[in-house]
């Protein structure tokens, strides 16, 4: 069995192995090499059907190259595509037509979100929702513009549910927040990269105060290791951006799922509160067509 190749050489390794593997594995490799960008968004069943082999044969092919699972292989393939001929998007080549660009990017996003749904740890989500319902305060920490938007979105949604929540992107404010959390407090840290030193420091300080540290990040990051509860989000690596658009979508989807779970646990009264908020904003919001002050 081979050992996993570096992400910059997987496609080359597959091509070089064509003459040295079994006939069934050859057919699997030919399907992958024909359109690797499409394969990244595929399933074991689709590969097996295209190669006219059994699904165990597909799995054995991945294991031959040192990958313990279909997902591990797909992640490595996506990384290889990201650093090879796809300089704009992991699924888009420079010669693609505009309809192809639209189709490929939308298909990639749909595939990533579907994969997220299959791998989200529902027990962790449920545990986080229960913690939030019972929390004395939920302080959301972030690093960078994108994560700041995510933490503000989470804070806004929790605020509407009647949860005592704040959002902090400034490192000093995060430290002040962390130092004042109690044992029923939550430091909810959002960082896809999950390795920014000062947010890790704030998380550690919150933990030392007895607060629960919740992380929305990739599995295996320093933040994930430090957190008490980690909502792990994994998406294919982007060809250009450190945090891909698919990661943004995944984080927003997790926030949506989590706040709905929180609302359910708060009970029927929450529905009435949300209806009242919607009614007030429809009648008096600054962007409301019914607002009499604008006429």
Image (cartoon, rainbow, N blue to C red):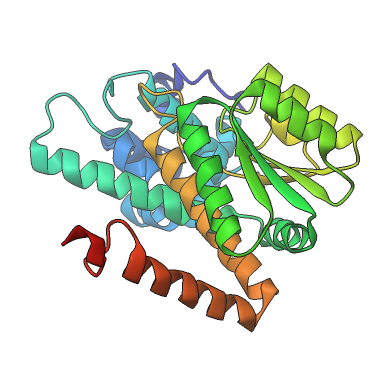
Q: Position of residue 150 (x, y in %)?
A: 51, 42
- Does residue 90 appear in this view? yes
Q: Position of residue 218 (x, y in %)?
A: 61, 36
Q: Locate residue 33 relative to residue 246 in the image: left or right.
A: left
Q: Locate residue 176 relative to residue 74 in the image: left or right.
A: right
Residue at image x 67%, y 59%?
Answer: 163
Q: Is residue 130 above or below residue 89?
A: below
Total residue callouts: 0
Q: Position of residue 167 (x, y in %)?
A: 60, 40
Q: Quadrant of the C terminus?
A: bottom left
Report which quarter residue 286 is drawn in: bottom left
Q: Locate residue 230 relative to residue 79 in the image: left or right.
A: right
Residue at image x 71%, y 48%?
Answer: 138
Q: Quadrant of the N terminus?
A: top right
Looking at the picture, tell me which residue is in the foreground, 83 or 245: 245
Looking at the picture, tell me which residue is in the foreground, 20 or 31: 31
Looking at the picture, tell me which residue is in the foreground, 246 or 190: 190
- Does residue 218 appear in this view? no
Report which quarter residue 158 is drawn in: bottom right
Q: Is residue 295 above or below residue 169?
A: below
Residue at image x 35%, y 38%?
Answer: 32
Residue at image x 55%, y 78%?
Answer: 271
Q: Position of residue 145 (x, y in %)?
A: 46, 28
């Amino acid at each position: 069995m081979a050992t996993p190749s570096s992400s910059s050489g997987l496609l080359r390794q597959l091509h070089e192995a064509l003459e040295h593997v079994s006939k069934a594995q050859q057919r699997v490799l030919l399907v992958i090499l024909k359109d690797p960008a499409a394969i990244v968004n595929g399933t074991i069943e689709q590969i097996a059907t295209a190669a006219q082999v059994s699904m165990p044969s597909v799995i054995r092919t991945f294991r031959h190259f040192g990958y313990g699972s279909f997902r591990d292989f797909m992640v490595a393939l996506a990384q290889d595509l990201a650093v090879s001929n796809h300089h704009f998007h992991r699924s888009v080549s420079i010669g693609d037509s505009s309809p192809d660009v639209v189709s490929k990017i939308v298909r990639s996003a749909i595939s990533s979100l579907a994969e997220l749904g299959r791998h989200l740890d529902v027990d962790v989500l449920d545990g986080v929702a229960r913690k939030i319902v019972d929390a004395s305060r939920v302080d959301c920490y972030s690093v960078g513009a994108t994560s700041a938007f995510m933490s503000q979105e989470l804070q806004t949604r929790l605020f509407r549910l009647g949860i005592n929540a704040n959002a902090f992107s400034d490192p000093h404010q995060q430290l002040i927040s962390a130092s004042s959390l109690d044992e029923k407090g939550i430091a909810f840290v959002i960082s896809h990269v999950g390795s920014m030193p000062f947010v890790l420091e704030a998380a550690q300080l919150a933990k030392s105060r007895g607060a629960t540290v919740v992380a929305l990040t990739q599995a295996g990051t320093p933040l994930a290791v430090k957190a008490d509860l980690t909502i792990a989000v994994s998406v294919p690596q982007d060809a250009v951006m450190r945090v891909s658009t698919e990661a943004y979508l995944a984080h927003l989807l997790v926030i949506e799922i989590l706040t709905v779970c929180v609302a359910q646990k708060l009970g029927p009264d929450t529905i009435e509160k949300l209806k009242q908020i919607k009614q007030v904003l429809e009648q008096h919001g600054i962007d409301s067509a019914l607002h009499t002050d604008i006429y």
